[in-house]
Amino acid sequence: MPRVHHIPTPRTCHRAVLALLAAALLATGASCGGSSGGGSGGGDQILKVGTVAAIDSLNPFVAIDAQAYNVFVMEYPQLVQYGPGVKIEGDYAESWTHSKDGLVWTFHLHPGGKWSDGKPLTAEDVAWTGNTVLKYASGPTALLASSLDGVKDFKATDDDTVVVTYKRPVAPVLANLEQFFILPEHIWSKYTGNNGKDLKAFFPEKHLPVVAGGAYSVTKYESKGVTVFKPNPGFYGPKSHAAAVTLSFYTNATSMIEDLANGVVDYVDQVPFTAADAVKKHSNLTLNVGPGSEVTNLIINSNPLKTKNRELLDPQVKEALEDAIPREQIVEVVFGGYAKPWANILSEYSKGDGWLNPDVQPLPYDTDKANQILDGLGYTRGSDGIRVAPADNGQPAHPMKYTIIVPGDLDFSGDRQFEILQQSFAKIGIKVSEVAGGDVSQAYNLITAPNYKYLNADMATWYWHPYVDPNFNLSVVTKAQWGNYSDTGFDDPKYDAWWSQQAKMIDQKQRQALVWKMEAYLADQRPYIQLVQGAVITAWGPRFTGFEPQLSGYCKCYYTSPRPT
């Protein structure tokens, strides 16, 4: 899923807020019977979740924050989702078939579902959402349009059946559709004016409760406070085992862990890497460490039309930068040992389906080799020890001094990681300085400035949570993603042609071969230098059990499965 978690900084905890909120929810009838399910929820206990990841928006045409995508999974129907084992399973669709040529897909839907305002949920909502995204795909709906790559149209043949017709074969049909959120036509159709631009101007957070057809409706929203999820009584799937879910944002990891130990929150959805060992000291808490999908990176502005510091376009210079990066030190110091060196644009989640090229491995830490490369390129050191890039392509000779944008919205210490990079690059005669990136939007604007032309930035640090299927994350370095998901400015027609080709390959082995080729090519060209893959670290107290830690942002069961002990 798209990115972004957030870095802890001091702030007061939510102890009093959560206590008052729990009392208010129970007083207003959030509880509803026994723990086996039914009604609007499955019990009289509230599942209280702590997080260091904020929600940037409740509008799926605007949000790029990973926590926002978790909200969308909970609120909106999807035809399919990822279930246990991170495998595709049905969500709103009970079953599906497709024509022999793979161009016509028929989805049979769960009957009887309702939106949280009581209106019927039908195939018409699916068709309207899909056709609306397609209509404005080159503009306002671009963020969701990649999930409908190759789709011609949607048709509701009856209330419980929708037919999706493709213009050409598409290999990852189900993986793409997992990223497609179905919206209530009777709400969102009011906002298609101004050539679709009103879709981006509508903010559900200002019109609570959100009308939802998934497992939950958001009834209270605070981007960096407390957000409340109440079960949707008309949900077609397994009911919540909790009367409600509260998501409480913390900027102080210590306070969050203390609140977990004291029962103020029941579950922490991402224990900060350097706080994991503190959890082990509490005998009443369970710490879960598993393979993660978070891949962190050093972004290098790779726009071939950039006019300054063009030496950063040279793959050999980028190779020298990678040689100089001590990944193991980053693992230990920044991630507390809960990560491993990484080089692939995809995560370990893609390994089981055969998409992860085993030959794409991190280069060993070797400053001598890095210096040899730069010496060989003629980048000599000045009297201050900083190398000088010779005049080239109209750019005068200049010292190798660069900026690195560090977003404030990280789930690890970007400042500490920058310090390691700064010290390491100094050993090879390169000076870097830090630029505070701010929140998600601010960081993206800095990286893509001016006006999504990718001309100003040198480098940045950030990360992705890649999907299992490679299609989306391989797309983020195509020219088509400029101004949408591209954060590198990479523009390579050969690579773009490969991406279009792999998306059409139905034969698994042929597609795998091309995907592996693309992974190796990106590792060689280095629009990103991938740094580490972080673990998924979650923790919970004794009041609930049945958590599915790996399914954040992938499955409604992430919130519906936990049940009171």
Image: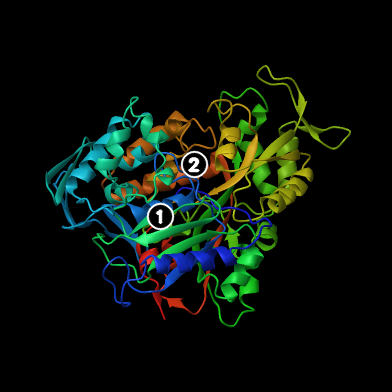
Please tell me whether residue 451 is drawn above or below residue 262 in the rendered image. Answer: above
- The mark closer to the camera, 1 or 2, is 1
Label 1 Cα crowd, 10 Å radius (few <14 / some 14-19 / many 20+): some
Asked if residue 467 shows in the view, the reply is no
Residue projecting furthest to the front: 27
Q: Which residue is mark 2?
A: 521
Nearest the eye: 396 or 331: 331
Q: Quadrant of residue 544?
A: bottom left
Q: CA distance from mark 1 to mark 2?
A: 46 Å
Asked if residue 237 shows in the view, the reply is yes
Q: Amino acid at mark 1?
A: Thr
Q: Amino acid at mark 2?
A: Tyr
Residue at (89, 33) in percent of width and height: 383
State which quarter of the image contains the C terminus.
bottom left
Q: Earlier in the sequence, mark 1 or mark 2?
A: 1
Please tell me whether residue 392 is drawn above or below residue 335 in the rendered image. Answer: above
Q: Is residue 116 left or right of residue 347?
A: left
Q: Which residue is mark 1?
A: 219
Q: Is residue 540 left or right of residue 443?
A: left
Please tell me whether residue 433 is drawn above or below residue 411 in the rendered image. Answer: above
Image coordinates of residue 480 in percent, x first then y, are 42, 31
Image coordinates of residue 81 in percent, x first then y, are 31, 57
Nearest the eye: 535 or 64: 64
Image coordinates of residue 499 in percent, x first then y, are 38, 38
Residue projecting furthest to the top: 394
Residue at (72, 35) in percent of width and height: 402
Residue at (77, 39) in percent of width and height: 431
Q: Quadrant of residue 256?
A: bottom right
User: Are the two marked residues, 1 and 2, in contact with CB atoms closer than 8 angstroms?
Assistant: no
Image coordinates of residue 295 in percent, x first then y, are 53, 53
What kind of element bears circle 1? strand
